[in-house]
Amino acid sequence: MEEASAPAAAGECSPAITPHHVVEGRSGGGVPTVLIHGVGSDLGRWDAVAAALAPYGPVVRYDLRGHGASPRPPGPYTIDDFAADHMALMARLGIRRAHVAGFSLGGLIAQKVALDHPESVDRLVVISAVAGRTPEQREAVRKRLEAVEEGGPGLVADGGARWYTDRFRAEHPEVVRAHLDRFRGNDPAAYAAAFRVLATTDLVDELPGITAPTLVMTGSLDVGSPPAMAEAMHARIAGSRLLIVPGVKHAIFEEAPRTVADAVTGFLHPQPPGDA
């Protein structure tokens, strides 16, 4: 493991890390795809999507700094840190241009990469991400951030009710329980540093600068990344597509796995695998 460096001063970038990552899919295929998970999760969140994309070409998944098997440098973290880690991994793998898909915090990182490094993004997918929080939403996420910083990730788990519909929790308690167990197992300091980025970063005014073809998606019942935010992104990113998945909350990968996998695959690869 890399040696921990001294904490970066507020507002400064810390040195980029090499995230733990896996490369799957058809080698020598079309444009690679890089998948970025959300806060408190890991690269396994993309299992179904990665499997659907594999026939089309290389698929790269990685654990964000402070998550999974990646290094845990001391905070604070910034959105620029996460974008720098992404670009460092791209350079390490020799990838100059890729499709980029991000979920939640990963969607925010994907926005930042597309804005700051447009030459590196072929197509962009932003799933259940944030943009254009109202004053009330900013206050709500501030309170959640305080809870995280005072008591760790478990204080905002809410038994899964924030992420899963009542019906899904009743029908698939083992899925929810496994998710909550992984979530509570996060390193408290690293989780808080990452959650602060999610809670305090909003790129809504910069989104018109995104030039990559973009798909924006969220669940119709998502509380933290509601349809209004997806609509705001769609309105600001020229030529983007919008998909609101009915009847699901933030756990869109678990509640609508086939819908998500089909939508992402169809957008990134309109042609059959043999023609990609």
Image (cartoon, helix red, strand yellow):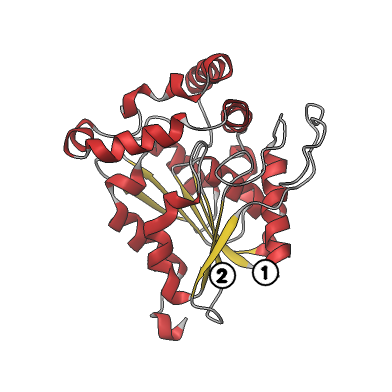
**Residue 271, placed above or below residue 247:** below
Q: Position of residue 58 (x, y in %)?
A: 53, 71
- Of mark 1 and mark 2, the one earlier in the sequence is 2
> Residue at the front extreme?
1
> Viewed as shown, does residue 93 lie left or right of 229?
right
Q: Is residue 115 above or below residue 191?
A: below
Q: Is residue 248 visible?
A: no
Which of 51 and 79 lies nearest the eye of the viewer?
Answer: 51
The local crowd at label 2, few if under 14, some if 14 to 19, many if 20 or more residues have their Cα within 10 Å, is many
Q: Which residue is mark 1?
A: 95
User: Three-letter amino acid code at disc 1?
Assistant: Ile
Q: Are marks 1 and 2 in contact (CB under 8 Å)?
A: yes
Where residue 82 sits in the image (x, y, percent)?
Answer: 67, 44
Q: Position of residue 121 (x, y in %)?
A: 62, 62
Q: Nearer the viewer, residue 71 or 51?
A: 71
**Residue named by callout 2:** 32
User: Which of the pair 117/158 is nearer the observer?
Assistant: 158
Q: Of helix, strand and loop, which one carries label 1?
A: loop
Spatial separation of the CA atoms under disc 1 and disc 2: 8 Å
Element under disc 2: loop
Residue 219 in sight in this render:
yes
Amino acid at pointer 2: Pro
